[in-house]
Image (tube, rainbow, N blue to C red):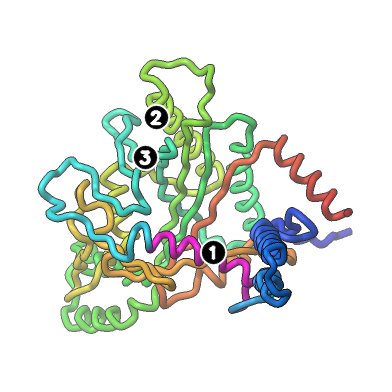
Amino acid sequence: MGSERLERTYRLEPLDSSGIFLGLGVVQCALLGGGITLGVAALTSGALLPVAAAPVIGAAVVSFTRIGGHATWEWVPLLIGWVWARLRRGRRWVAPLPLWSTTDGPAPMPPCLDGLDIVGIDWRAGMSLGAVRDRHRQTLTAVVPVSGPQFVVEPRGEQERLLAGWGDLLGQYAVERGVVAHLSWSDLAQPSGMGDHIAWLGSDDRGAPNQTASASYRELLEVGTTSAINHEALVTITVARERLSRHRAGKGGANEQLRRALVTSVEALLRGLRSADLAASDPLDPAGLQRLIRSRIDPVGARSRPRKGRLVERLALVRSPTAGPMALETDWRHLRADGAFHRTWWIGTWPRLAVPPAWLEPFLSGGGVTRSMTVYFQPVSTHQSRRRIERDLVKLES
């Protein structure tokens, strides 16, 4: 007797929207509590009833109405943060010039990136591991370029196997006292320009070309390069000083222990990625991180352009002082970094229904624009996860 294979689907945990009191969130409770307090104070001081009721009505309107498809109270912290940033930091920031006067100094950073720099860590013989150091949070972050099989065209069973391998990789960090603070993967999708193919056309590997046919083919490629999409996937891993074991002994103090912890975590990440059938390159060195940051600051300007059968690299000369942004200008709807305009969308909820393994494919494969998607994972120990599951079950039952 034959049996049909049951295709697996996946349910993603929604955000906890139950609130802290009668289904109300922190901001809503603060608004209503503040409005009631002001109303009572106004009545006590002898104000008229309509005047005293105004704060209560205003707080209720902000707490229970919607603007632009979002709850009105969700705009309150955004507006407060926006005004505070404008008053404290201003709208524009420009790096001091000249940046190339020294070759070893760190890149000047805007206030939003203060405390970040790039350091090198001894990794393997003759190799250096690049890390982004956050001096305020005492963390180190390494970046690993990753590629994999063509997930979308794989059979459904193979997709499930690959996804299970990725889940096993993430599961190894769900420990009680791990040094890893968080992981993330980021995919940059942009018109590729068929750079590799154009570079191959100009090489000697394919023999002597027919000049007329070659020139006609290059003209065709220059028209079609904007529709080809290139994906650049990166996996980052961050270790935190606060997660170091207090009983761990070692020479060099906490900073040296943190460096060793990053090296050990990167080695484990590389083994896990390769076990999940992902092609993981060596982690980026300091120079590679500098080039990566410059390319992400202005991904359109950094992209190679075909000119007469050759690739013209438009990425600026990258050294330590020029690895950061040259200028920033903030606006309510976008951020301008150097020559590129950036907008950010925060995904507030996942699909409520069960989804197949390749449910993100329509978003990731859309062409015509340059965009980056980042998914952030924070390890949660099994003990904490079990307590959260029990708490959510109690909320659902009540």
| Amino acid marked by disc 3 | Arg
Circle 1 — which element? loop
Nearer to us in this view, 177 or 195: 177
Q: Where is residue 8 in the image (x, y as percent from the top left)?
A: 74, 59
Amino acid at the residue labelled 1: Trp
> Who's the residue at 63% across and 38% down the image?
174
Q: Do the residues labelled 3 and 1 touch (CB within 8 Å)?
A: no
Label 2 neighbourhood size at 10 Å, few (<14), some (14-19), many (20+)?
many
- Quarter of the figure with the C terminus: bottom right
Q: Magenta span covers which residues?
A: 69-86
Quarter of the image for residue 178 reads top right
The circle on residue 194 is none
Q: Name the residue under label 2.
A: 259
Mark nearest the camera among 1 and 2 is: 1
Q: Nearer the viewer, residue 17 or 174?
A: 17
Compute the Cα span from label 2 to label 3: 10 Å
Number of the label disc, if any, that sits on residue 133: 3
Q: Which mark is residue 346?
A: 1
Among the 4 quarters of the image, the one containing residue 7: bottom right
Task: Please say whether residue 93 is visible from this viewpoint.
Answer: yes
Q: Position of residue 277 (x, y in %)?
A: 53, 47
Q: Residue at the spot x=77%, y=60% of the render?
A: 23
Q: Which of marks 1 and 2 is nearer the N terminus?
A: 2
Query: Horizontally, is 117 left or right of 75 in the view?
Result: left
